[in-house]
Amino acid sequence: MIDPATLDAAAVEAWLREEAPPRLEALRASAEAHLLREIGPVVYLRGLVEISNHCKRACLYCGLRAGRRITRYRMSHAEILACAAEIERRGYGTMVIQAGEDPALDVEWVRDLIAATRARHDLAITLSLGERPDADLRVWREAGADRYLLRFESSRPALFDRLHPAHPEGQDRLAQLRSMAAMGYQIGSGMLVGAPGQTYADLVRDILILRELELHMIGLGPWVAHPETPLGRDPHAFEAAVDQVPASEAMTLKVLALARHMRPRAHIPSTTALATINRRQGRAHGLHWGANVVMPNITPLQYRRDYEIYPAKGRVEVARAETEAEIRANIQALGRRVGLGKGHAR
Ligand code: SAM
Ligand code: SF4
């Protein structure tokens, strides 16, 4: 087992550049050993509900960016509560509420949704609603939200700023994560692997920050090109001049294993982006390389096709039942079992 304390910047970079199969197997096995020791052979399922695809931001990688002409939707409280009932029926302990940065999801609207969910269902609530002022976050925490996911995407300010065109209300994501932790949220964050412009030095810093932030959850995945976004249309215009990190499955799996060493007890999903770049085995590979969470998509089908952050996402999740069966089979094939209960961070 690799001792996480030995993983300084030089060691992390050496692992990112490693290509020898026996060495990579040692990294994978060590990540799995840390996972089994700290969490056990358990995979938690969280029901993901994509409640709105309206967004005021224009992140260069994302298909929901403001200004794109797509069919926009916003689910009603009643529709979201029906999803909560479905999540509870399936025995998942958590509802993850995700959306674009939609100004119509104001502080009261979200507070009332959290309160109604809490009153009717025995579910943990994770929010992923983008950058928000502390005042809103405090109200939602008091209403019963347990966790918040906000990726820092890149810890190099110049790259973050390039990927996220200036917005008057933009705020420092690392600062938001720290204040949410102080409010008692379990906090989750992470980065895009291989976004055009990301160098090895950037990715090393991103990985070390996972430990510094003392994250309870880590969300990371490969950048997937969306041809109708600036990055997808012309990735070479943005690519780092030297040392561009590839947005490959192999690189993402190394980063997952390193993230597991940075935070051995963190909840780490095997993301849909990974399942998108390797349709057949991406999800299972993520679990094999240190992930312990899967987030089945519960968004009603009529909305799901419009939450197209990258193409082909819809195809990974065409039929709910099929996805559920595939996910459970993957978990069993790996010798793991589905975790019961809410699966709070330890
Ligand atoms: N609007 C919120 C936010 O940005 O935090 C939540 C929704 S956003 C669609 C969720 C995540 O999708 C982002 O953190 C981003 O990393 C990821 N994402 C967006 N476009 C992507 C792409 N082209 N490839 C991979 N991941 C992408
Ligand atoms: Fe909006 Fe999030 Fe997409 Fe950025 S990543 S455009 S904030 S939905």
Image (cartoon, rainbow, N blue to C red):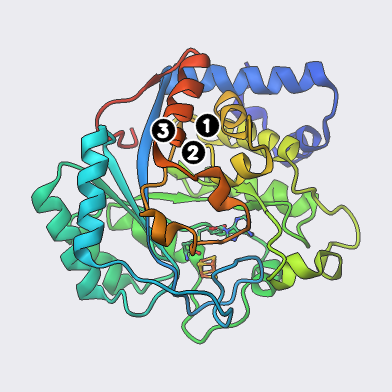
**Camera-nearest residue between 12 and 123:** 123
In the orientation shown, which residue stands out farthest toward the top? 335
Task: Compute the Cα span from label 3 to label 1.
Answer: 17 Å
Task: Compute the Cα span from label 2 to label 1.
Answer: 5 Å
**Camera-nearest residue between 163 and 34:** 163
Q: Which residue is mark 3?
A: 324
Q: Amino acid at mark 1?
A: Ala
Provide the secondary structure element on which disc 2 rests.
Answer: loop
Q: Is mark 1 within 8 Å of ligand 1?
A: no
Vertical comparison of 18 with 193: above or below: above
- Which numbered disc flags the more N-terminal residue, 3 or 1? 1
Tell me, yes or no, whether the two marked residues, 2 and 3, touch with CB atoms within 8 Å.
no
Q: Amino acid at mark 3?
A: Glu
Q: Which residue is mark 2?
A: 269
Question: Could you say which quadrant of the image residue 18 lies in?
Answer: top right
Q: Amino acid at mark 2?
A: Pro
Tell me, yes or no, whether the two marked residues, 2 and 1, touch with CB atoms within 8 Å.
yes
- Which mark is on residue 137? none
Residue appearing at x 54%, y 28% in the figure: 287
Provide the secondary structure element on which disc 3 rests.
Answer: helix
**Camera-nearest residue between 178 and 241:** 241
Question: Where is residue 332 drawn, in percent x and y?
Answer: 46, 16
- Which mark is on residue 291? 1
Count of number-bearing discs:
3
Task: Compute the Cα span from label 2 to label 3.
Answer: 15 Å
